[in-house]
Amino acid sequence: MFAGVPGVNSPKAIFNFSEKAVLQAELNRLHREHKDKFLMVPQSYFSSHKEFFYSHKYPAVLKLGTAHAGLGKIKAHDEKQLDDVRSLMSMS
């Protein structure tokens, strides 16, 4: 692909991994098609704390920002802890 060197990944695969929302949409499609053969943990994305609404089971693991290696994660065991996390999100 670049400099005449063939790539291992297709252009579609490269595009799918370029943005988290695009990747999540592709994973959701695979899950719908393959059900029990392609299991997924429920995930939600929010652009700000104002849009944040959690409707899955507890405990919940929240990741803030785009850091990696375990940074920016917090575990909430119930609604009270989730409210505390929400208040911290509003300050960042």
Image (spheres, rainbow, N blue to C red):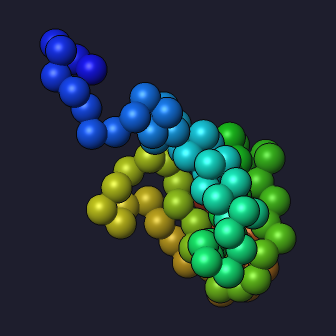
Find residue 71 and report its horizontal and vertical position in percent: 36, 61
Report the residue at 62% width, 42% height from top: 21
Find residue 60 and report its horizontal and vertical position in percent: 64, 77
Q: Quadrant of the C terminus?
A: top right
Q: List the single residue furthest toward the top.
A: 3
Find residue 28 and report its horizontal and vertical position in percent: 69, 57
Residue 10 or residue 83, whichever sits in front: 10
Q: Is residue 6 left or right of residue 51?
A: left
Report the residue at 16% width, 22% height from top: 5
Residue 77, above or below 61:
below
Numbered disc total: 0
The quarter of the displayed image where residue 33 is located: bottom right
Residue 77 or residue 41, whichever sits in front: 41
Report the residue at 27% width, 39% height from top: 8
Residue 91 seen in the current view: no
Report the residue at 27% width, 20% height from top: 1
Q: Is residue 81 left or right of residue 19?
A: right
Residue 34 or residue 45, whichever sits in front: 34
Residue 37 seen in the current view: yes
